[in-house]
Image (spheres, rainbow, N blue to C red):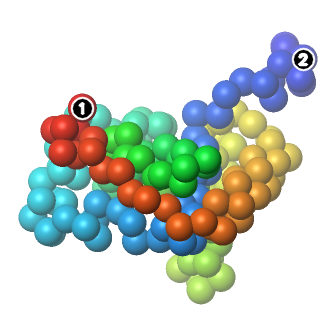
Amino acid sequence: MGSPLRFMMQPLRLTIELVPESAWHNNLRHLLPKPAWDELRRATYAAYDQRCGICGATGRLEAHEVWQYDDRNHVQTLMGLIALCGMCHHAKHIGLAELLADQGKLDFERVVRHFMRVNQCDRSTFEAHKREAFATWQERSHYEWDLDISWLANGGN
């Protein structure tokens, strides 16, 4: 059995990714015509062999945009897409998951348990990661972000 410190230093497979409030709706689903978005998300599911790219679950998948943030120049760069199961996608957007739970539309504790199971971590690790993600979100939400979707123009490479 490893030491607790070593356990906590392992990278998380499933992370929380909160899009800055000022950049909400800066995404491909809103920018592309529906047929183009549908084609792109289906290609993403096929690239992941119809499985969640994080936990490996099968069933209904959702396309999640992977963004990189240049905090100095305030550029939000699309790095690609990943196929996610609903639980992994809710964990990625934990703020939205909390809102849905408040409305009675989602079991928030189920999302937390999924996060802990995928990452093989405890509740305190989840809470620490969540606090850090929200602190980053709050700081980034102070700025307007330029959108770089050249990944798409380059054929997804």
Looking at the picture, how far across and down is residue 156, in whole percent? 22, 38
Q: Is residue 82 above or below residue 36?
A: above
Q: Is residue 44 shown to the viewer in this render?
A: no
**Residue at the image position 77 percent from the left and 51 percent from the top:** 132
**Residue at the image position 71 percent from the left and 65 percent from the top:** 138
**Residue at the image position 33 percent from the left and 44 percent from the top:** 81
**Residue at the image position 54 percent from the left and 61 percent from the top:** 19
Q: Is residue 36 above or below residue 69?
A: below
Instruction: Specify whether 126 is left or right of 18.
Output: right
How packed mark 2 is, by other alpha carbons closer than 10 Å (few <14, some 14-19, many 20 or more), is: few
How packed mark 1 is, by other alpha carbons closer than 10 Å (few <14, some 14-19, many 20 or more), is: few
Looking at the image, the residue that sits furthest to the front is 73
**Quadrant in which the N terminus is drawn:** top right
- For disc 1, the marked residue is 157
151, 40: nearer the viewer: 151
85, 31: nearer the viewer: 31
Label 2: which secondary element: loop
Looking at the picture, how far across and down is residue 130, in whole percent? 74, 54
- For disc 2, the marked residue is 3
Under mark 2, the amino acid is Ser
Q: Is residue 25 shown to the viewer in this render?
A: yes
Looking at the picture, how far across and down is residue 146, in whole percent? 43, 59
To which quarter of the image does residue 82 belong?
top left
Instruction: Specify whether 132 is left or right of 56.
Output: right
